Each structure stands twice: as structure tokens, then as C-alpha cells.
Image: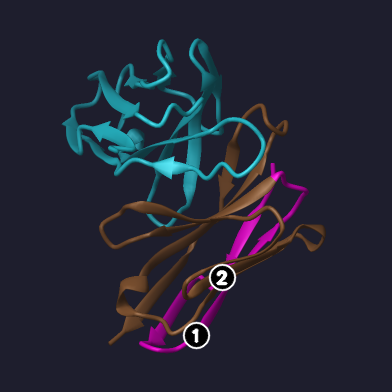
Amino acid sequence: NAGVTQTPKFQVLKTGQSMTLQCAQDMNHEYMSWYRQDPGMGLRLIHYSVGAGITDQGEVPNGYNVSRSTTEDFPLRLLSAAPSQTSVYFCASSYAGTGDSPLHFGNGTRLTVT
Amino acid sequence: GIQVEQSPPDLILQEGANSTLRCNFSDSVNNLQWFHQNPWGQLINLFYIPSGTKQNGRLSATTVATERYSLLYISSSQTTDSGVYFCAVETGSSGSARQLTFGSGTQLTVLP
């Protein structure tokens, strides 16, 4: 059982470049989300999705796009990378309903924008 | 938005010692989760605990939602317990979305 898989693990971009961070889960979770983690801070929610075709903004959505065409995949797109987007990005998933639904995280993507 | 405060920010223990980590939150929440981020950066869910007490081995957690706090207890600490412990609270419409707000974490170092 792979859980939540993120690729790539590391990425270096130049300012203005675009890229897509991939996230896939094999637990049939309805809910998927992207967080960024900056030094000395907790995680901040970028975007989330409660099912295929449904996405919404979190706390820090500017500069990022998402789509959810399948239950399994939730890619995060950086349209024009900026140094302020240097961070560690985590994808997470869980069941969406009420009840015991712990959040499962991928191993993260460390992104540096120069 | 909701504020989540964790204390202490840093904690250094000798192996075998016990510790209590605290999470205070400023408003009503749907649930609360505790996570451990190990030194390699992996985030592991420890507890999903909207209220009451749960135990898992040497770790236990208690959430008193009416008083807006949660406690994580670590007993007989081991060096592998080192890392950052985060609590995260869920707001938003119950059952419709999971909007977790994270605290800034407690950095735990367990010395051999």
C-alpha cells in the first residue's frame, strides 16, 4: 500500500518558470489537500478538494492552481515561480465524511526558486 | 481566523523522561489531530482526537473541546521520539471539507 506519493522529491526552478508537483493516493480518499511548510512555521493550506471535479482555496492560494480530474490525483501547478514560493510542499489525503478520518501525508517536495 | 498555540516551543529531555505538550485553540473546532514530523521531514498522524482521551503505546492524548485545549503525553521517551510535534484543528462545515489550521509545533529533542 503506497499511501500518498509525491514527485519530485526535490526541484530547483528559476524565477518565472512553471512546473507541476504531482500527488497520487491509492486509499480511495475523497479529500486531498496541499500544504506548504516554511522554516519555523506550521503548515499552511494552499488548496483542497473534496472529490473529483471540486476544488477550493485554502489560506495561501495565490500563485498556485489545482485540478482534480480523478479521485487518485491532485496536482499542484506553479504558473510563474517566485522566490517566495521556496518551501517544502506536502500533499495529504483523508476520507471526507464525519468520523475518524486522520490525515495522511506524502513525504514532501522541497522546492527552491532562485 | 482561528489561532492555534503550542507550548513549549522547544523541549529537551533525557531518554526515559516523561513530557506533556499543550495545544490551545481560540474557537470551536470540529476535531483535532496530532502529528509527529521526524528528523527526515515525514509527517505521521498520531491521534485523531476531537474529544476525550486516546492511548497508543507510550503516547496518549486528551482533548477538552469545551475548554479549547489538547494535551499530548509522551512517557518513557526514546531518542526516536525526537522531532516536531504539531497539533492541527479542523474548522469548516462538518463533513464537507477538512480545513486544518496547524500550530507552530513543539521541537522535541530526546538525548541518549
For the residue pair A113 and B101, the one nearer the viewer reads as B101
**Residue closest to the eye, B81 or B9:** B81
Quadrant that contains the C terminus of chain A: top left
Work out which quarter of the rendered image holds the N terminus of chain A and state it: top left
Q: Looking at numbered disc 2 in the image, what kind of residue is underneath it?
A: Ser
Q: Does the magenta run of residues contain B3? A: yes
- Sequence-wise, the earlier of marks 2 and 1 is 1
The chain letter of the brown chain reads B
Q: Which residue is mark 2?
A: B60
Residue tagged 1: B18
- Residue at (40%, 32%) from the top-left corner? A27
- Magenta residues span B1-30
The image's colour scheme reads: by chain
List x then y, in percent, for residue B87.
55, 57
SS assignment at label 2: strand
Could you say which disc has been placed on residue B5 in the image?
Answer: none
Q: Is residue B107 above or below residue B36?
A: below
Asked where in the image residue B5 lies, by quadrant, the reply is bottom right
| Callout in the foreground (2, 1) | 2
Q: Residues within 10 Å of mark 2 (few under 14, many from 20)?
A: some
Rendered shade, chain A: cyan
Residue at figure coordinates x 38%, y 52% from the top left: B43
Seen in the image, is A69 located left or right of residue A97? left
